[in-house]
């Protein structure tokens, strides 16, 4: 049954719907929907496995990120729980992450019960040489940033295509910004007037109208000019605009990034 979906269709569901695997997670365990292993998927897997082996400890609380690379991290956590009898609590960052935790019989937690996490492991859309990160291609940026902020160690796992010298070098979808629906037009104009580029409302594929986040908000994607560089100030300025809920800029938040490389090695950046 899972062969009805091509890898391309699967990616579109994850990246464009903002609903994170939609109802598929209710039907299949992650192991049955893993994309066919090629160089890119192999790179995701080696990065995820190395991060989990290094940072997931017994009797710890782990933030579970969202997106395609995190599936491999959950896979490795499941293996280690079975092999080493690890006791871990997993706090999700999205509907997708919650379904992965439940479907694979890991112990589900939340921030009410576990406000301090030992580490959070998540993917990224792009990481520059200064450890500035764009996240939110899958529409989960708000909950991802909240969970990351609660973790003693925030770890990024990604394939080699996410490794850039400067933001926008490889990732061309813009910086996601989650906004209250009534304010989207005002925020669009304000960002374009202040910083240039253009801002688009992210539209859904399987419904008419915009993508709606897990929190009931819209997402704007800001295609920014390439000369911009002071991302800390820009992030603060945009975050202070009334109606902005959160940005997809994760500035100096990650302790380490694991990039899976085409040759099967893992590059570490910190």
Image (cartoon, rainbow, N blue to C red):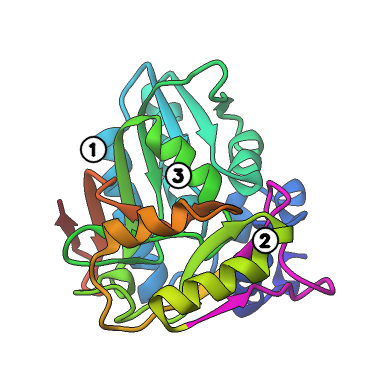
Asked whether 201 or 57 is in front, the reply is 201
Is disc 3 placed on a helix, strand or loop? helix
- Residue 163 lies in the magenta stretch: no
* Residue that mark 2 sits on: 183
The local crowd at label 1, few if under 14, some if 14 to 19, many if 20 or more residues have their Cα within 10 Å, is few
Marks 3 and 2 sit apart, C-alpha to C-alpha, by 21 Å
Q: In this view, does 100 lie to the left or right of 151?
A: right
Q: Position of residue 205 (x, y in %)?
A: 75, 76
Circles 1 and 2, Cβ within 8 Å, touching? The answer is no
Q: Majority secondary structure of the magenta segment?
A: loop
Start-end of magenta stretch:
198-219
Point 62% across, 64% down: residue? 219
Circles 3 and 2, Cβ within 8 Å, touching? The answer is no
Is disc 1 placed on a helix, strand or loop? helix
Q: Position of residue 170 (x, y in %)?
A: 33, 80
- Residue 210 lies in the magenta stretch: yes
* Residue that mark 3 sits on: 145
């Amino acid at each position: 049954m899972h062969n009805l979906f091509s890898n391309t269709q699967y990616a579109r569901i994850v990246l464009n719907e903002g609903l994170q695997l939609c109802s598929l997670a209710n039907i299949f365990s992650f192991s049955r929907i893993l994309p066919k292993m090629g160089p890119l998927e192999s790179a995701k897997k080696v990065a995820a496995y190395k991060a989990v082996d290094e940072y997931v400890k017994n009797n710890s609380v782990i933030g579970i990120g969202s997106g395609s690379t995190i599936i491999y991290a959950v896979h490795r956590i499941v293996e280690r729980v079975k092999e080493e009898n690890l006791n871990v609590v997993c706090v999700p960052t999205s509907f997708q992450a919650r379904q992965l935790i439940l479907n694979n019989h890991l112990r589900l937690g939340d921030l009410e019960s576990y406000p301090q996490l030992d580490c959070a492991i998540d993917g990224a859309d792009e990481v520059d040489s200064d450890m500035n990160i764009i996240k939110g291609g899958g529409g989960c940026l708000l909950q991802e940033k909240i969970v990351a902020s609660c973790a003693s160690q925030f770890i990024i796992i990604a394939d080699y295509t996410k490794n850039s010298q400067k933001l926008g070098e490889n990732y061309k979808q813009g910086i996601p910004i989650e906004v209250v629906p009534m304010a989207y037009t005002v925020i669009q104009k304000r960002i374009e007037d202040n910083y240039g580029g253009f801002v688009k409302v992210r539209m859904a594929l399987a419904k008419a109208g915009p993508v709606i986040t897990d929190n009931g908000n819209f997402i704007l994607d800001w295609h920014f000019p390439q000369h911009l560089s002071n991302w800390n100030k820009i992030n603060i300025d945009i975050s202070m605009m009334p109606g902005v809920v959160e940005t997809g800029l994760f500035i100096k938040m990650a302790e380490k990034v694991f990039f899976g490389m085409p040759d099967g090695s893992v590059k570490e950046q910190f």
